[in-house]
Amino acid sequence: MNILLLGYGKMGKIIGEIAESRGHSIAGKINIDNREDLDKLDPKSIDVAIEFSQPEAAFENISWSIQRQIPIVVGTTGWLEKKAEVEEMTLTNNGSFFYASNFSIGVNIFFKVNEFLSKLMNETDGYQVSVEEIHHTAKKDAPSGTAITLAEGIIKNLKSKSSWNLKGEQESSDQSVEITSKRIDPAPGTHIIKYESPIDDIEITHTAHSRQGFALGAVLVAEWIPSKKGVLSMDDFLSF
Ligand SMILES: NC(=O)C1=CN([C@@H]2O[C@H](COP(=O)(O)OP(=O)(O)OC[C@H]3O[C@@H](n4cnc5c(N)ncnc54)[C@H](OP(=O)(O)O)[C@@H]3O)[C@@H](O)[C@H]2O)C=CC1
Ligand SMILES: O=C(O)C1=N[C@H](C(=O)O)C[C@H](O)C1
């Protein structure tokens, strides 16, 4: 496949290496300083675009791809206020759009464990739940996209919770899942769910040791997406 990399930073570089090691070619490596190179590309020669840039850039990159009928796999976080608009654009243009807050298979198993645990917690009211995420200091958004997905998984399953808040930025309430964001180098991404009670605590943690798992997941989805249409997610890609 011929893959366009929209965003060629920490993630884009690893994705490019994995893609080439799996026999794919790279149509372009686009950063903020060479965006004009997009105009030199023949959209018909591109099989798929992989977008890992930054929150302010994601919407423009996604729109560019959808309007040219290029399937797009998006990992950038922190732009979700525009997601409904992107979904509408995808359907209007008969395009293919895939977003995941986290492409690691391990994290997607962790998402399922989180949902199962929060369902079980309806059996008792003795525990207070919270989410913590730890990332490197270059991360631009907080809370992480993964922490938001985890909080949404809790809200969907735990009847006592209906919203989330970022500690230190937004007010908390009894109905809210509090998220704490910490920035410590070189953490590639750690997520912790805690249920605390006066008697005991239950804690589950996912710790990424590198960016390899995120990047491989994105390439695997890119290999899968060209024959698919519509608004797609990890639930469409994974069989669990
Ligand atoms: N879903 C997932 O599994 C994962 C998601 N992420 C997310 O992916 C995103 C990127 O992460 P990471 O690679 O670590 O970040 P980096 O800051 O290392 O890389 C981002 C790159 O995007 C480039 N960029 C900025 N503006 C544009 C633009 N308009 N068009 C194209 N490229 C642009 C930057 O270029 P320049 O340097 O010139 O400014 C930079 O090279 C983040 O939002 C992060 O949260 C990260 C890991 C996993
Ligand atoms: O910015 C990062 O690095 C990461 N971002 C994603 C997120 O916001 O959840 C995924 C991963 O945790 C790494």
Image: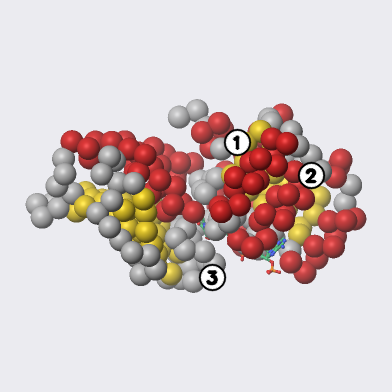
Q: Position of residue 130 (x, y in %)?
A: 29, 55
Q: Position of residue 162 (x, y in %)?
A: 34, 46
Disc 3 target residue? 138
Q: Is residue 158 above or below residue 56?
A: above
Q: Quadrant of the C terminus?
A: top left
Residue in view at x 53 percent, y 37 percent = 234
Label 1 sits on a secondary structure element that is: strand
Q: Position of residue 95 (x, y in %)?
A: 73, 36
Say what amino acid the circle numbered 2 marks.
Gln
Disc 2 target residue? 67
Residue in view at x 33 percent, y 64 percent = 171
Q: Is residue 76 above or below residue 107?
A: below
Disc 1, disc 3: CB below 8 Å? Answer: no
Seen in the image, is 120 located left or right of residue 168? left
**Residue 232 image label:** 1
**Residue 182 image label:** none
Residue in view at x 54 percent, y 67 percent = 140
Q: CA distance from mark 1 to mark 2?
A: 17 Å
* Disc with the residue nearer the chain's start (3 vs 2): 2
